[in-house]
């Protein structure tokens, strides 16, 4: 996260009138946006990035409604660029360290998208915009694409280690959340750890998704067998931890 001096919103009537969940979302967005107050507005990406410890309690549909509440309150501006949903905190007014935003602003996005409508040809107006419109457009599109795909990249990267019996949409989503959760805990998964965990999950294929969700819910860094007849337990020290 960029290092900056944060603006104080505690005396804001707009913030004070938000629902509790929308205010939590706004606060977490403040901690994630870049120095220009811009970030992705895709709930699928926001959910694991903003609520890694509350994945079970956080729904994408709820995040979308809360984003709309923030926009209605005049706190954020939602817009699209190159098919990507983006947002900008209105009057962010932070002390900026970066010279360029990772995301195009609302007005710049309109110009960039207009440029793309010329069948691949850039108009004179586009060429004159900042003196390097084509290069800027390609840079922003590339970075926006990376942002939206980075949280799923490991699924492709690890696919050869995932047994065929586990390759269901539900499991792949749970595994995606597990890798993101481990990254947030600063405990990355090594190939050896992935291999051991996949073998364990394959042996417990009927409960594989539940095992992953249980570890995330209880803030564990390894995977453990489920105790029969219970959905939640504290693993004893004798339990095998599948975190090689």
Image (cartoon, helix red, strand yellow):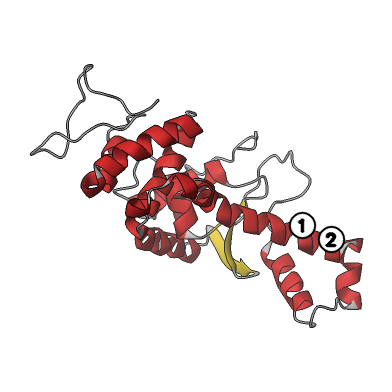
Q: In which quadrant of the rendered view does residue 119 lie?
A: bottom right
Q: Is residue 161 above or below residue 123?
A: above
Task: Give the secondary structure at mark 2.
Answer: helix
Do residues under tags 2 and 1 come within 8 Å of each other at their CB atoms? yes
Q: Residue at x 87, y 66 (%)?
A: 129
Rate crowding at label 2 as few (under 14), some (14 to 19) or many (20 or more) other CA atoms within 10 Å: few
Return the mark for residue 201: none
Residue under numbered circle 1 = 139
Res. 104 in view: no
Where is residue 144 shown, x and y percent of the image?
A: 65, 57
Q: Nearer the viewer, residue 45 or 243?
A: 243
Count of marks overlaid on the render: 2
Q: In which quadrant of the rendered view does residue 212 lie?
A: top left
Disc 2 to disc 1, C-alpha distance? 6 Å
Quadrant position of the C terminus in the picture:
top left
Farthest left residue?
Answer: 229
Residue under numbered circle 2 = 135
Q: Nearer the viewer, residue 154 or 113?
A: 154
Q: Is residue 184 above or below residue 44?
A: above
Where is residue 39 shown, x and y percent of the image?
A: 59, 53
Task: Give the secondary structure at mark 1.
Answer: helix
Q: Is residue 70 above or below residue 240?
A: below
| Side of 191 relative to 96 (left or right) | left
Q: Residue at x 47, y 52 (%)?
A: 46
Q: Residue at x 88, y 75 (%)?
A: 125
Quadrant position of the N terminus in the picture:
top right
């Amino acid at each position: 996260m960029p290092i900056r001096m944060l603006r104080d919103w505690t005396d804001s009537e707009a913030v004070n009138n938000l629902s509790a969940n929308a205010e939590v979302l706004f606060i977490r967005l403040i901690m994630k946006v870049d120095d220009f107050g811009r970030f992705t507005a895709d709930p699928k990406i926001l959910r694991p990035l903003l609520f890694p410890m509350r994945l079970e309690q956080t729904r994408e549909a709820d995040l979308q409604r809360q984003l709309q509440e923030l926009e209605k309150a005049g706190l954020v501006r939602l817009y699209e660029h190159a098919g990507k949903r983006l947002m900008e905190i209105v009057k962010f007014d932070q002390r900026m360290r970066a010279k360029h935003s990772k995301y195009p602003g609302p007005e710049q996005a309109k110009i960039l998208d207009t440029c793309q409508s010329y069948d691949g040809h850039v108009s004179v107006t586009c060429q004159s915009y900042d003196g390097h419109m084509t290069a800027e457009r390609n840079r922003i599109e590339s970075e926006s694409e990376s942002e939206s795909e980075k949280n799923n990249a490991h699924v492709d990267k690890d696919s050869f280690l995932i047994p065929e019996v586990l390759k269901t949409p539900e499991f792949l989503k749970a595994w995606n959340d597990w890798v993101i959760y481990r990254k947030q805990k600063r405990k990355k998964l090594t190939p050896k750890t992935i291999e051991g965990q996949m073998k364990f999950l394959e042996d417990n294929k009927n409960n594989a998704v539940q095992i992953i969700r249980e570890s995330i819910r209880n803030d564990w860094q390894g995977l453990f067998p489920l105790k029969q007849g219970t959905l939640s337990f504290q693993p004893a020290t004798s339990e095998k931890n599948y975190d090689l």
